[in-house]
Image: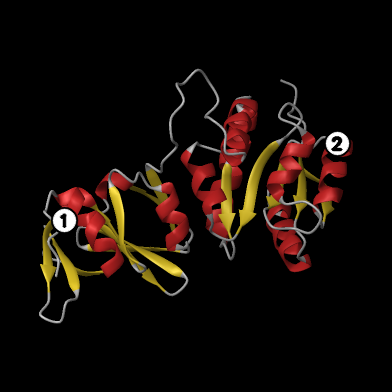
Amino acid sequence: MTARRPLKVLIVDDESLARQRLHDLLSREKNIEIAGQADNGEAAVAAINTLAPDLVFLDVQMPGKTGVEVARAVGLQRMPATIFVTAYDHYALKAFEVAAIDYLVKPFDDERFEQAFRRARRMIELEEVHRLSEDLLAVLQGKQDAGNQAPSAQYLERIPVESRGQVRVVAVDEIEYISASGPYAELHVGDKTYVIRERMQSLEEQLDPSRFFRIHRSSIVRLDRVDTLLRDPGGDYAVRLKSGARLDVSRNRVEQLEKWMGLPGSRS
């Protein structure tokens, strides 16, 4: 049996420490060749076209071109298997949702790197990279999922939650409400709370508005979990959910919520 050729890997990140971290982790792996490194988007495009790597670790936010713009510039057919290295944002959410190769959220530990790398190697060996890359780029460009699906809004159905090097996927159907906590959002699922680094505005835009409603700058509720609309003597509003949780409602959101609940909206 002929031995497999080494897996050619390209590292792209504008932070030198981040590149060194990936280099050190990759150096522990068997049968790979670190073909090169790039520290900006333009250099990444040139390196991909010249070196033809099998796998690229690609930072999302870089000078010159972002990771998404690098993928566009290289083109679907030439883009190698890609693992995004990024802060947690909507790119990572959507990439995970359509089964992109993988992504790493800085800072990541050795175990999380190992999971992503093993998955990428397996997909490369199974020659499924181009299909996944097409799906990924289509979503990142705000297009329809690749394939012959009917046009539809691409609302989130699953949200990946990174914790201690593990990724848990939370089904949107299981979320009762989402609350803001500084730069983080907390997903409330039964008696559990999952924390993600994501802005409420971004989540609101990606959730189906027929199922989720932002009742306050710091709260998004799943509408079918709302039990009662409450009005305090001072004129402030709140909702009580079926679980018993109580959440404030902004006054400028009350009328729309009343309409959804079928209430007459007779506020004074």
Q: Position of residue 155 (x, y in %)?
A: 41, 41
The 10 Å Cα crowd at callout 1, few under 14, some 14 to 19, many 20 or more, is many
Q: Residue at x 42, y 62 (%)?
A: 200
Question: Quadrant location of residue 68?
Answer: top right
Q: Residue at x 76, y 63 (%)?
A: 20
Q: Position of residue 137 (x, y in %)?
A: 63, 36
Count of residue discs: 2
Q: Position of residue 256 (x, y in %)?
A: 25, 55
Q: Is residue 228 left or right of residue 141?
A: left
Q: Amino acid at mark 2?
A: Asn
Q: Nearer the viewer, residue 60 or 199?
A: 199
Q: Nearer the viewer, residue 43 or 54?
A: 43
Residue bearing mark 1: 226
Q: Amino acid at mark 1?
A: Val
Q: Nearer the viewer, residue 10 or 171?
A: 171
Q: Residue at x 20, y 62 (%)?
A: 191
Q: The residue tagged with tag 2: helix, strand or loop?
A: helix
Q: Is residue 193 left or right of residue 10?
A: left
The residue most toward the bottom is 234
Relative to 234, does residue 128 appear above or below in the rendering? Answer: above
Quadrant of the rendering where the N terminus is positioned: top right
Q: Is residue 141 visible?
A: yes
Q: Position of residue 252 (x, y in %)?
A: 30, 65
Relative to 136, does residue 13 appear above or below in the rendering? Answer: below
Q: Is residue 142 left or right of residue 21?
A: left
Checking the image for residue 49, the label placed there is 2
